[in-house]
Amino acid sequence: MRRFGQVGSFDEQSIPEMNSEVLDFRAASEFFAPVRKLTPSAFRSLHITTKYQGRDVPTVGGYLLFGKNRSRLADSTEIRSHLPQAAEEAIEFVQKHMSREAVIGPIRRMDRWTVPLVAVREAIINAIVHADYAERGSPIRVAIFDDRVEVENPGLLPLGLTIEDIRKGVSKLRNRVIGRVFHELGLIEQWGSGIQRMTAACQEAGLPAPGLEEFGAHFRVIISTIPTGPVLLDEKDQTILRFLGDRRGRSTAQIAKGIAISARATRTRLAHLVQRGLVVEVGSGPQDPRRQYFRCESDKME
């Protein structure tokens, strides 16, 4: 996810979501007392702090060395893979650290993600496709907090395009080669639909619409993990859950017949409901003829 080669080590990178107050300057000064007196410029020359958009922020190394509460930085990674693979690795990293809640079903426990993975995926793919790669040394960042997930890329919206426009599905492709390749690989479904899919996934999960903002020369998507309403389902999904309401397991074919839609459409909807933690899949694999689906005990639908 690093655009072009960048001089410097990982621990020299800034942590822009923090300010210099998270550093224990007193402890740092005491360590350096036998050597020299530390001044603000000395902190910068040692790369304990660095300038970011006109303000002092800690570097990764500075925070690890002298952070007041280093446990806030639980984990970090730098991804340098080819962009299609980098997208998958970034999504895996978020999935590894994202909070989950236990849902107890009739057969086994299942973890439900606090943020729909489809929304995270769309945010990361959009960031890669629409990043301004002329901005050397500005990485795409994915940050996970207790109450939100943030995905940030260098580059403001193209001239003439507003945040309200992209919420409505209007899009201007900045990187045509990357866009075409991602589209061919199936990583992009339709131009301009990413923000709308992201918003729909969040609202269906009872979360607010993602926040979109421009700051400095960057664009940021903020996905909240704090619910604002019940889980929303369309009529077909509600029909499937009602059909499974007796808590008995059924196969894809039985469900398709029971709700009168094609087996293919049923499989797609079941996969969506499983991902959202509303249905549990029991079987040894996708080709298991005895694979069955059960409705989770604690689901709520509107």
Image (cartoon, helix red, strand yellow):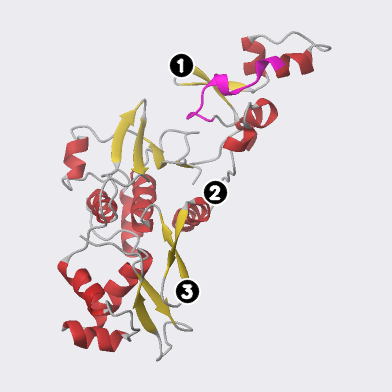
Q: Are marks 3 and 1 in contact (CB under 8 Å)?
A: no
Does the magenta-highlighted stretch encompass residue 23?
A: yes
Can the viewer see residue 17?
Answer: yes
Between the residue at mark 3 and the residue at mark 2, the CA separation in whole angstroms equals 35 Å
Return the x and y of residue 212 as percentages of the image width and height: 29, 37
The amino acid marked with disc number 3 is: Arg
The amino acid marked with disc number 2 is: Ile
Can the viewer see residue 142?
Answer: no
Q: Quadrant of the C terminus?
A: bottom left
Q: Earlier in the sequence, mark 3 or mark 2?
A: 2
Q: Which residues are magenta?
A: 15-26
Please give the residue where the numbered disc 3 appears in the rendered image. 108
Q: Nearer the viewer, residue 4 or 65?
A: 65
In the orientation shown, which residue stands out farthest toward the right?
34
Return the x and y of residue 124 as percentages of the image width and height: 39, 49
Left or right of 2, for residue 230: left
Please give the residue where the numbered disc 2 appears in the rendered image. 79
Q: Secondary structure at mark 1?
A: loop
Label 3 Cα neighbours within 10 Å, binned few <14 / some 14-19 / many ≥20? few
Between the residue at mark 1 and the residue at mark 2, the CA separation in whole angstroms equals 27 Å
> What residue is shown at x 20% (from left), y 69% (from top)?
238
